[in-house]
Amino acid sequence: MPARAPHGEGRVAALGSCARWLAAVAAGALLVGTAALVFREAWAEQLFASGEPEAVRRAAELVPQRAQYRLGLAELAEREGEDPIPFLKQAAASSPADAAIRIHLGLREELAGRIAEAELQLLEAARLSRKYLPRWTLANFYFRQGRPEPFWHWARQALEVSYGDRTPLFELAWRLRPDPDFLLAKAIPLRRAVLSDFSWFLLDRGALGTASRLLAELAADAQTGDRERLLAATDRLIEAGAERAAAEVWNGLCRRGLLPYRPLEPQAGLKITNGDFRIWTTGRGFDWRISGVEGVYVTPAPGAGWRINLSGKQPERCEILRQMVLVEAGKRYRIECRYRAELRGLAGEVPTGLRWRIRARDGALLAESDWLSAAGEREVFEFQPEPAGAVTLALEFERLAGAVRPEGFLELRAVRAIPTDRSRE
């Protein structure tokens, strides 16, 4: 007969077998429970995605702890004219670190007239997130509540982390106090991007003084990426009649090497930008501007300078190119032009129909040269502006009486300005 196991050992074996069976049962139950939970959540997700009111409610019943479903219930309540705040509070409790929920809840509390509770929720949103939206929302809240001091604080905080279009926040600040220097001190952080946007905002509001100062400071340490916007600002200031302020921005770009010209120095004499036509024009600021009229084509000359090609089909009167130049009151200036012309059918001292004219900002003619001749190489004329400011130096064409419109080209070699001591009698 085989030996029988001791009674104690058999009992231990039986207990071990029972434990394994119970563990297997527990694992199976856990798997079934997990599968049921996964199925319930998947079914709730599908119901919620449908957007149907009853389906959204059913999803919230199936998974009551999901903040997204509580927000869905809040949206349904708003649509149906009911109070969404209880659902928003539930969502905030389910997702306590979500700043967006706090913002939504705070705005609804404000709408309900519970201002203190609204402020607490919005401040909590700003504590949870250091991004732009909570700070922008708080600035708006304090603006609506007529509380300027916290508005200035949160406007500045928002601009510190801002990106994209900052105009709406500038607008709020301007409506509260349209004082550029005050806003710079209270609400505008010392970030280049913000200062650049604010300077353009001020240009749009006609606050040229502060805008000009900001732009000049930005130009003084401008980088390559700043060049185009500062050139555009130069054009805006010129259009607004603030040529001296525009020159400060232009000169800053020149000093930084972002423009290939020497700075303008009207006190030392009239400065013609790119007067030797050494490089092609930027077409901006105080550089040459080509009018681009039909039948006239301006190109770099084969040797040096620029070539003005006349097709013979140009308008009877037209401006070909011009430049804004700064002048000082009481000074007399001599303009000297060096050129060469080759025009079909014209020779000797026959006038070409081209001449230099100097006009005031309002278009009034201040001075003009003689007609450039077919055989000429140099033309000189003088003028004395009054008062100081800026004038336009332009090369213009005019078909002379009894003459055909010339065809060929004229090469500009240099245009320079020489201050003279002789005063007008």
Image (cartoon, grey):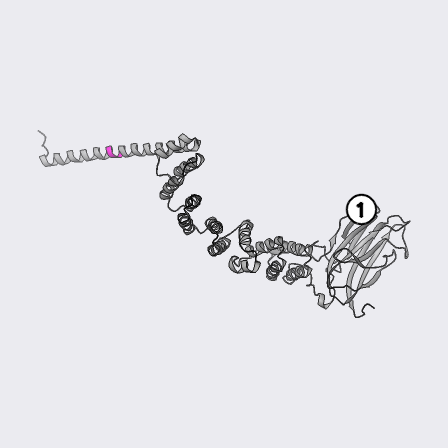
- Towards the viewer: 230 or 259: 230
Q: Residue 188 at what x, y percent from top left?
A: 53, 57
- Vertical side of 77 occupied by 379: above or below: below
* Magenta-colored segment: predominant secondary structure: helix
- Towards the viewer: 195 or 300: 195
Residue type (three-letter) at the residue carrying disc 1: Gly
Quarter holding the C terminus is bottom right
Q: Seen in the image, is 47 located left or right of residue 24? A: right
Q: Secondary structure at mark 1?
A: loop
Q: Residue 54 at what x, y percent from top left?
A: 40, 30
Mark 1 highlights which residue? 295
- Vertical side of 102 occupied by 34: above or below: above
Whether residue 331 appears in magenta in the rendering, the answer is no
Q: Residue at x 33, y 34 (%)?
A: 37
- Towards the viewer: 401 or 278: 401
Q: Residue at x 56, y 60 (%)?
A: 181
Camera sees residue 302 = no
Camera sees residue 21 = yes
Q: Residue 353 at what x, y percent from top left?
A: 85, 53
Q: Seen in the image, is 300 located left or right of residue 232? A: right
Quarter holding the N terminus is top left
How many numbered circles are shown?
1
Whether residue 25 appears in magenta in the rendering, the answer is yes
Q: Residue 192 at what x, y percent from top left?
A: 55, 57
Query: Which residues are the magenta region?
Result: 24-28
Residue furthest to the top in view is 1
Residue furthest to the bottom in view is 421
Q: Quadrant of residue 209?
A: bottom right
